[in-house]
Image (cartoon, rainbow, N blue to C red):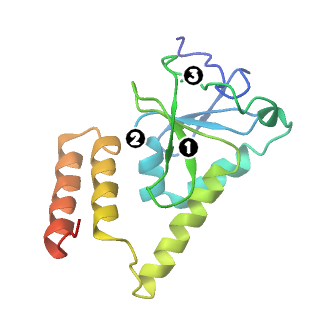
Amino acid sequence: MSQSVKPCPRCSRPLTRAAGSDMILDICLDCGGVHFDHGELARMARNRRDELDDVERLVERHECLADLVTSRELLCPSCGTPMETYEYAFTSGVMLDRCPKCFSVWADDGELQAIQDHLEGRAERRAHGEDALDPAVRARMLLNDMHAGSGTATGRLAALSSLCDALTRRPLTL
C-alpha cells in the first residue's frame, strides 16, 4: 500500500500523518483511531506516557462513524492483512487490533486513554508496594515486549535479561 495515503481500517477515510517527538503516527480525524507502526505504541507507553494523552486529545472524534462499522474485519493500513484483536498488556482489559504480518497496532478512539489509565494504575500500585502481577503474567508481558517492542539486538537482549530476572526472582507455579 502507498506510504503517502493509508486508509483507516475502521471507517476507510484517509489517515493523516502527525509527527510526535520521535515518531510519525497515522491518525484518523473522523473516527479518532491511531495507527502505530511496529514497536511505536510500546515505546510511547514505556517512555512517553504524557504523549498518549496528547495523541488522544489530537484525535478526538468528530463523527460517530466507528460505531457504524464495528463488525467488519479491520485491514492493516500498512500491508492490508486482516488484523487480530488482542488484550494490551494481557491484564489491562484494553482490546486493540494488531497485524500478524507487520505487527502494527490500531487503537480505536478512547483506547489510548484506557491504556494511560491502566499504566497509571499499575504505577500507583507499585508505588504502594502492591505489585499484584502474577509471575506467569509478568513473564508473558516481558516476552511480548521482547517480541514487539524493540527492533534492535540491544533492546531484545535487555528484554530477555528482564525476563530471566523475573523468572529467577519468583518461581512460576503452573
- Closer to viewer: mark 2 or mark 1: 1
Secondary element at tag 3: loop
**Which residue sits at x=74%, y=26%?**
11
**Residue 166 horizontal side relative to residue 49, left or right:** left
Question: Would you name the residue on which mark 2 appears?
Answer: 39
**Residue 134 horizontal side relative to residue 69, left or right:** left
Displayed quadrant of residue 69: top right
**Which residue sits at x=57%, y=22%?**
75
Amino acid type for the residue under numbered disc 1: Leu
x, y percentage for residue 9? Answer: 64, 25
Foreground residue, 71 or 28?
A: 71
Question: Would you name the residue on which mark 1 appears?
Answer: 96
- First reached walking from the N terminus: tag 2 or tag 1: 2
- First reached walking from the N terminus: tag 1 or tag 3: 3
Q: Crowdedness of circle 2 by 10 Å Cα count: few (<14), some, many (20+)?
A: some
- Closer to viewer: mark 2 or mark 3: 3
Secondary element at tag 2: loop
Question: Would you name the residue on which mark 3 appears?
Answer: 75
x, y percentage for residue 25? Answer: 56, 35
Amino acid type for the residue under numbered disc 3: Leu
